Image (cartoon, rainbow, N blue to C red):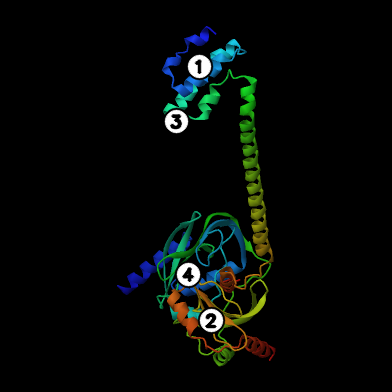
Amino acid sequence: MHVFRVMAVLLLLGVAFAQNIPIMPKNPLNYLLKSLQTEAGLNFKGVVTESVIFPPRKETNQTKENLPAPPPINPNLLRQNFSSSIENGEQVAGRNTWKITLTPNNHDAASFQFWIDREWNIRLAHQETDFNNTITSQARFTSIEGKPTVRKDGRSLGKLEFKPKLEAFLAKTVGDIALPEGFRIFGLKVRTVGQDNQPALEVRASNGLSVMVLVFSPIKTRATPKLAMRKLLTKNADAWVWVIGNLPEAQLQRTANSVVNSLDLTGLLVKFNEQNQK
Amino acid sequence: MKRNQDVKLENLSPEDSSWASFLSSAAELREVDENAAPTVLNALKLERETDATWANYLSSGAVLRPVDYASVKPALEAVKLERTRARKVLQLNIMKFVTASAAVAAVMIGVLVFRPASTDADPTEAFSAYQEASQGW
């Protein structure tokens, strides 16, 4: 009986190959990562309808030539924090797709769906949904011009890498930041804020796919949905921490509240520069 | 004078009767003045009986002589003066209002133009940071 079964499977596979029918990938995450790498090296365009609620922008709905860039990814954290599935997707811009769904283990975090072209292995649509099951961003090709061609500018998919030294530096200077479950710190950079371009320190965290940002700022901002803020008690100058992410406000506020009270922002910026020069 | 006899003097009070006598005895009155006499008398009666105003009398006094006009003219002049005064007061008030409004507007514009810049950051700055961090390539 085994022999017949194997033969039947081989026969089906043979028919599939003969008819050039793509076979559903076994590992959705690996397939997604490979597809994003493929897409990074290709040049193609068409008409994309895009709708973004978060992060908010002036015009929610826009038409573009291409999909927005995917978020930077850490494959290990992605595997650790998300469960993935793959199924037959609906046609997008008249092309057959696989639909990959990434569901976070932390249900407060955003979930993602990608529609990948079965033949070209590139994204044709994507969708991000928040903890409330509200679609916060989505983009989809409605038509595609010709076929993808190889890019010459050497674009590559941004990969997040663990930075234990950076995490240690932050733990020492601003305390143990209570990030949402599954998130880790990946980046730190100086940015300017306000009309006077005052220096601030930006901390980037991710759960492998979804990004979260903390800004240690000398000026405050206005708390809005998905943006929490807290004033830090400082001796010399005022300082605030802003926390932005596609997460519940309560979670963002918990993170803001976990930062040490007596933060010396100027000293922190000096230390950061010293750390960078080492 | 024959027409004057048509006025029924016997129906008038002694005071009105004396007015009537005065009017009717004015030998130099022209015919139009004679015609005006009953009007004057009636106006007097009306004023006393119904508390009608001088306006009734004046408006019906189209046949008054130049001497009557001369007596009315100061009143008209007074009215004209009063109206001119009221108009000037109104113009003055309008000018005061316009001046005050311009001053207030100037102060408001000054406040808007020269006020110190807000020290708060717009939330779009925070969302820009998130957007930049979310770019995979």
Disc 1 + disc 2, Cβ < 8 Å: no
Q: Residues within 10 Å of mark 3 (few under 14, many from 20)?
A: few
Q: CA distance from mark 3 to mark 1?
A: 18 Å
Quadrant of the snapshot with the C terminus of chain A: bottom right
Q: Residue at x 53, y 67 (%)?
A: A55
Callout 3: residue from which chain?
B
Query: What numbered label is drawn on residue B38?
Result: 1
Q: Which residue is mark 2?
A: A231
Disc 2 + disc 4, Cβ < 8 Å: no
Report the front residue among A33 and B98: B98
SS of the residue under disc 1 = helix
The amino acid at mark 1 is Pro
Q: Residue B54: in sight, yes or no?
A: yes
Q: Nearer the viewer, mark 1 or mark 4?
A: 1
Q: Which residue is mark 3?
A: B51
The amino acid at mark 2 is Lys
Give above or below for A188 relative to A8. Answer: below
Q: Which residue is mark 4?
A: A225
Q: CA distance from mark 1 to mark 2?
A: 96 Å
